[in-house]
Image (tube, coloured by chain):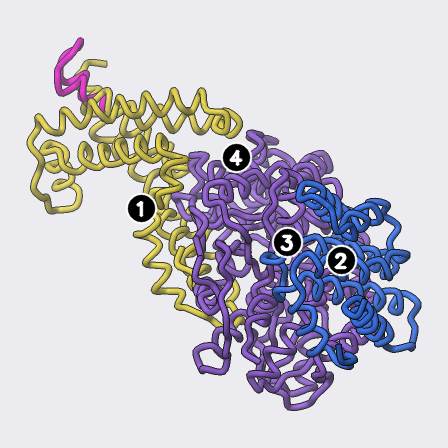
Chain colours: A blue, B yellow, C purple
Amino acid sequence: MAPISNDDTFRQSLLQLEPARQRLVAARFVEHVLPLCSDDRIGRALKVAADAEASDDELAGALKSARAAALDTHTRCGAEGNWRDQAGYFVCRAAVAALTPGELAKGGSPAWQAAMSSRMARTSVLISEESDAVTSRSESEWQYRALEDYTNA
Amino acid sequence: MTEIEFLSWVRGPGFQIASIVLVAGIIIRIAEILLLGRAANLAEPKGSEMGNGIRTIFTRSIPDAGTFRKSSFTLVAGYIFHIGLFVTIFLFAPHILMFKDVVGFGWSSVPTPIVDAVTVVSIIALLAVLVHRLTNKVLRFLNNFEDLLVWFVTIAPLVTGYIAFHRIGYTAPALIGIHILSVEFLMVVFPFTKLMHAFTIFIARWYNGAISGFRGVES
Amino acid sequence: MSASLEKGINALREQVDSTVATFFSSCVHCGMCADACLFYTETGDAERTPINKTEPLRRIWKYEYTLFGRILKLFGLAKPVDEKLLTDWETLVYDSCTMCGRCSMVCPVGIDIAGVIRKTREGMAAAGHAPKGLIGATQRAITIGSPMGVKLPALQAQIRHVEEDLGVKVPVDVEGADYMLLLSSMEIMNFPEFIGAVTRIFDKAGVSWTISSEAFEATNSGIQIGVSDLAAELVQRVVDAAEKLKVKTVISPECGHAYFAIRWDGPNLVGKPFGFKVRHILEVLDELRRDGRLKTSGFEEQKLTYHDPCQITRRGGVIDEPRNLIGMFSRNFVEMPEHGKMNWCCGAGGGVSSNERADDIRLKVFQRKKSQLDEIRPQAIISACSNCRIYLEDGLEEYNMEIPVLSLTETLAEHLED
């Protein structure tokens, strides 16, 4: 495939993948930001997501687990926000997206949503470090390359 | 005191005292409410206060289906005895004559057998209301002396009136005297209790409709 | 905030006006308000009867503002407003009430019970009886500018993220823009996709808008805790920013209480009418729809329902707009059995979700929402309040229900025609 250089092409490419393959790509996106999350459930959920042979039951179980983790890590309304912890929350969200069946995903693409949430996780870390490193552009670039690698493999 | 003396007293001084307490009491209660005033609403209105206020005075009498299902006893029994009270107090020929003496004009009455039946139904409804009040979880929590007192002064005129009309037990003068006394008791108790809702309900519903209506919601 | 019983009692006195007096004079102890309140229906605890929650204010009214009551007090027959009463009432006034207002719709004599509870909170807070979580949130809101401690750099980072993802600029501090958008900390932290969604929609529709770097917070914890002075300060910041940028309309985002606070309470808190309009994002979007400036394509095929956020719908007046908008992308829409102004609360608003102590009861009363959903079995729920969204998710998870919860604005943005 031609090199991806912007989000429009990125998203179109993702949409062209069938659901099972989208899940596998999504799992890669989330694995890249996994270190930002301290909840063990996500690691296990991702293993299931990355397994091409995973059964529907296993996927449903992993999704449930990821959702629970997302809810546990969100910042309660009015509570003091911690952006480092929020990074973990977004990783959970990304895992949830990766495991959500195609029809129910936002934007029609589980992988797109997973990509967005993964980038959000990276941004959260930057915020917590009060970094002027400005953007998570690097994460987007990494995702473009990851998708290219996957489709060319 | 003879029966006639008793009857004369309740129809004379008794009625005067009760009337003064009732009227002065109502005026004081309403004045002490309205004199508090309320601040003008400085937000940009989405709907009218006056119109929606008036509307709610009427529409609040008609509950939505879900509310009716959840509170059916309260609503049905409540309507029965309220309508019953209206019929027995205002549409009964002997009462209309009494009003004619007081305000100078009368109006048509409902046939006595109907009033009689309505009285019985209202009494039964009020008895059911009492049972409900004494057995329902929420009401048992809320109940206070006033709730029971008001229940009593409301049912007493209906019961004594029924007995007086059917001449059960004592002679007519005594029974009528007791009936009038029970009404005077109600009148005297009225301004000090939740019976004031008979008047304040119009203001409260108006406020409710106005407050919601300002925000564009019909309540 | 130094608190004392005396301050509390004085605060309650200030709340007594003709509406309060009329309402308390009219209560006939019928108990219908309990049947309308999910905190009673799902727990069976009679003390959670809505009108009972107002007892501290009622006592002040009765024994200080009625002739008969004052006479009773003279004879030592007044029920007191003391530390014990306020302590006992804390979990009733805060943990067991979201000020959803369903009781106000149902009371046969017309009492705006939720409004009276709101007034009661003024006294509770001034006396130091507000929940810890809320006190912290309000302090952060005053000192940092956000109840969750979201500072400008964080928002700027989220904005940069959005700009890169969409390739569209998010206007900040643009003087003379038509609209100034506020954001709730909940959105910035938990649902930042909302910012992107609004940006895309406004860009496509050619809306002139901006965010203010000096006042971007929509949430008003002062309202939830019930301290009008603090609530006023938070509103004033928005007013100052809106006036500085000379905007025509301030937009309240997908947050229920934020809308109520700025739209309906705002001018009354700061003591003068606003020189600008206030609209909820749904109102603005619906106006764009009516003007033909929103072009969408495609439909959601799944069976959708809409959860009406209480402060936007019943207490806010934004009832038809969300339905009009949903109609643009859904052909398979079903209403909850009791919807619109008679909707049932998610159980988390009005400070309940900020209060850890209230977690158990919040999850318990979610059963009311659960039973609504069991009846219609939707495949997804749409809502327009970030708090409702996350706590709907929380409740659904608790009861093992697999129903995604979506944001109306975000879903609309996804269906924008390219």
Q: Is residue C356 visible?
A: yes
Q: Secondary structure at mark 4?
A: helix
Of residues C108 and A111, the one nearer the viewer is A111
What label sits on residue A80 in the rendered view? Answer: none
Of residues C389 and C124, the one nearer the viewer is C389
Q: Which residue is mark 4?
A: C41
Indicate the amino acid at tag 2.
Leu
On the picture, is C298 further left or further right than B47?
right
**Do the residues indicated by labels 2 and 3 lie within the same chain of the protein?**
yes
At label 2, counting other C-alpha atoms closer than 10 Å, the crowd grade (few under 14, some 14-19, many 20 or more) is many
On the picture, is B88 further left or further right than C118?
left
Q: Nearer the viewer, mark 1 or mark 3?
A: 3
On the picture, is C91 further left or further right than C159?
left
Indicate the amino acid at tag 4.
Thr
On the picture, is C129 further left or further right than C178?
right
Q: Secondary structure at mark 2?
A: helix
Q: Which residue is mark 1?
A: B62
At label 4, counting other C-alpha atoms closer than 10 Å, the crowd grade (few under 14, some 14-19, many 20 or more) is some
Q: Is C196 situated above or below B192?
A: below
Indicate the amino acid at tag 3.
Pro
Displayed quadrant of residue B6: top left
Q: Is C86 situated above or below C348?
A: above
Looking at the rendered image, the quarter that the C terminus of chain A falls into is bottom right
Of residues A30 and B110, the one nearer the viewer is A30
Q: Range of the magenta residues?
A: B162-181
Q: Which residue is mark 2?
A: A24
What label sits on residue A101 in the rendered view? Answer: 3
Chain of the residue on which disc 1 is drawn: B
Residue A112 x, y percent position in the rendering: 70, 66
In space, the residues marked 1 and 3 are separated at their CA atoms by 46 Å
Pointers 2 and 4 in contact (CB under 8 A)? no
In space, the residues marked 4 and 1 are separated at their CA atoms by 22 Å
